Each structure stands twice: as C-alpha cells, then as structure tokens.
Amino acid sequence: MTASARDDIVHRVFQAGVVGAGGAGFPTHVKFRAKAEIYLVNGAECEPLLKVDQQLAVQEAALLVRGLALGMQTTGAREGIIALKAKYAEAIAALEPLLHPNMRIGILQDVYPSGDEVITIWMTTGRRVPPGGIPLDIGVVVSNVQTLINVARAVDGEIPVTHRTLTVAGAVRQPVTVTLPIGTSMREAVALAGGPSIEESQTAYIDGGPMMGRLLESLDIPITKTTGGIIALPADHLLIRRRRSDMRSILNMARTVCEQCLLCTELCPRHLIGHELPPHLIVRSVNYNHVAQPSVLLSALTCSECAICEAYACPVEISPMRINQELKAKFRAEGARYQGALRSADPMIEGRLIPISRLLARIGVAQYNHKAPLAPHHYVPKRVAIKLRQHIGAPAAASVATGDTVQCGQCIGTPPADALGAPVHASIDGTVTSVTGDAIVIER
C-alpha cells in the first residue's frame, strides 16, 4: 500500500469519527497509523447478557471482514484474526467463506474474561502483553467488531458514525438488541425493550455489562459511541448493592474480615497471565497503612477492573477492585507508572478462567440470560443530545450554533488541532436547540 493510499484511509476513518466501540473509545485512526504484525478483532463479548457483536458478526459479516482487511493494510499486519467463542456458530459460519488467505477465526473458550484483550491475545496468539504495556508492545493491534464495521462504512461509503448498536436486557419485558441514533436517551432504549418487568421504582440500571458496567443514576442520559448495553436489575440485587457501597464501608470490611485466602489473586486474570498484580497483598497493604513493596501497590495500575475479585472470588464480600480503583486514581494524579517484569504464566491458568455458566449463577443473573434479537433499524427519536466527548482524549468543539439546521451525518464538532480526539456528527435531521460545553442538542 502506498503512503498516500494509507493516509487516505486514515483520514476517512478520522473524518467519520470512528472510535473503539468496545468501551474505551480510543480513536481508531490513531491505531491505523501503527505498525503491527497481527490485527485482532475482539468478538468475545464475554460480559454476560450482552449480545451485540455476535449478532453483528452475522448480519454485517462482509463489512467486518472488509474493516479487518483495511486495518491490516494500514498497519502492515501479516495476519488477521477474528476472535469468537465456539458457541457463536452462526457468526463463524457467516464469516469463514469471506476470510482472506491471511485471516482466520480464533476460537475462544466460553469463559470470563475472554474479552479482556490481554486474555484474548493470549488465547488466540500465545503472546502475552507485559505489565503496564499495550498490545502494540508485542506487535498486535486490537479492535472491536462494531469498530471495524464502522471503519468499512467510513472508508468505502464515507459514512460517519451516527448510530450505535446495543443490548437492552435484564429485568425488561422483551430483551432486545437495537441500533439507535447516538444521543438517544437511555430511557427510550429501555422503552423499546418493553420497559422494566418489575416496578419502575424498584428498578436500577447498569450502563454496560453486569461485571464492568457502571451504575446509572438516571436514564435521562444519552447513548454514546461506546454504549454497549443497558442492564435492568432489581434495586436490591447484589450487583446494585455492591455498586452503591461507599469506599469507607469497603475499607472497613477489608480490615475486619479479610482472611488472606488468596482466591482473589489466584483467579485474577492479569496475575494468571504473568503480571505481578496480587489483590490479596494490596488489600493487606492498605489494611496496614501501605506496608508493602512499592511495586505491589503500583501494580494496581495494571488492574483491568474485570470485577472477578469482588463478584466471584471473595467469599466475604470484599472488593479488591474498588480498592484498586482508588489507588489507580491516586497514582495517576501523581503521574506514577508501574514498571515490572512479565513473569511466568500460572500453569493452572486454563483451569482458573471462569465458565460463563458458573458466573451467571454466581452473580445472580442466570434468570435474565435470554436471547436479545437484533431489531430492525427504524427508531428515530424526536430529540438527541450528542456528547462532545465520546472517546479518550480531548472533547470535540462545537462547529454549529443554536438555531442551525443540520442533517444526519453532518459534522457538528471537531477536536482541537493536533489533539487526540474524534469528530462528532448529527444523528438525526433537525434544528440545534442547545449548545453547551458538554453536548449539542438536536430536535426534529
């Protein structure tokens, strides 16, 4: 590929506002400028109840393969791998006839967290990301299924990212996977699933999956490019109670009942893969005024926040993950970085990854594990609120004003020059009714 052709692809991906759809929202055009040996598509979707990528891989198989091919061309990758669980048989069948000779399906076990990119890379390539490192350190670039579908649309059709596919599940009447204009309120998304199946006043919601998603204080917030799911649960569900626990209670519990059983460390995916990260020692150190080797505490920076330690491993309801989150915030504010060697992988690693069936039962969501079929793409809200920051990096700056008439797909905000960021676009036709430092509101 010539430099000019590569630059044209990267430019189109930037102009379309493509960012990582898996949750982090890293601007994809930056990844496309990297050099790599392997381009990996993370289609594991190991968060319970979410059904987006496995269905998009079937419906948009050709676009996914095209997006992967474009990523391989720009990064110079010699191999492309689409990582899917063996149980996604329909997706595998749709993709296999379309694969190029230098592409393959990487079959994953039905375990959690097979979608943690460090684990996905290890399972499909045998390579291990070093502690505090990134996939590119070992020659791998990783993108989500929906990301590369958006790439194909951006490059071949100059179509910007204006919609997001997400699953609405849990305690709702009709679990569904829907494609909605970005900026649609989460309340409207829940309504498309028939609303909650229990009393509204007794329902709580999680933005994302039940393991790593965050508790929503209101449904009157907009869907963004990175919204993967909305999970409704009873307000007294253990996953909701845990998220509502304050840090003082968590620390008091840790000081009172931690028995140093080591289960949190023995089941920690990053520790299993060879990272230092020892949750039990971090808890002990915090309990005893941070008496530990500096690297032990700093290793909290390598925590993926998969929540296994709190939701599955700990027998006495401690949350090492929440303690890690507090330490990470402190260390990042101080500009601290973790530096440690990659150790040998735990010889028991394959036996210590958690079967999804067990996880569903352990976190109390097995009763909600139903199909969430992909609905037709028809819904158009009367109002959208387009967040100016839907990605890692600098927020976009509005390029429209109140009273302007806009069309779906029109660029309405661009990032500062030379800053990490991505443009945002109108997701419906309408009139701009509000512009703030946070969002642009458009009404039909």
Image (cartoon, rainbow, N blue to C red):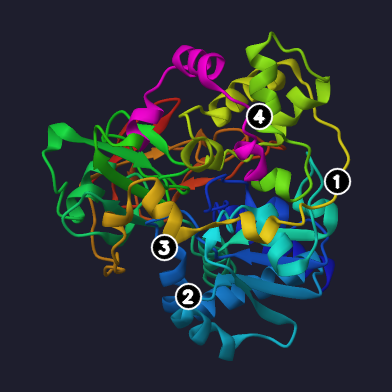
- Kindly report the distance in space between the C-alpha atoms of the residues bearing marks 1 and 2: 32 Å
Residue type at the position of mark 4: His
- Position above or below: 287 against 417: above
User: How far from the left and from the top, in percent, is residue 244?
Assistant: 37, 24
Is residue 308 shown left or right of residue 209? right
Q: Nearer the viewer, mark 1 or mark 4?
A: 4
Of helix, strand and loop, which mostly describes the magenta segment? helix
- Position above or below: 264 against 2: above
Residue 343 numbered tag: 1
How crowded pointer 2 is (Cα within 10 Å; few <14, some 14-19, many 20+) is rated as few
User: How far from the left and from the top, in percent, is residue 262?
Assistant: 65, 35
- Give the mark nearer the N terminus: 4 vs 2: 2
Mark 2 sits on what residue?
87
Q: Is residue 142 visible?
A: no
Closer-to-camera residue (426/121): 121
Q: Nearer the viewer, mark 3 or mark 4?
A: 4
First to last magenta residue range: 239-268
Closer-to-camera residue (158/164): 164
Mark 4 sits on what residue?
280
Residue 214 numbered tag: none
Mark 3 sits on what residue?
52
Q: Nearer the viewer, mark 1 or mark 3?
A: 1
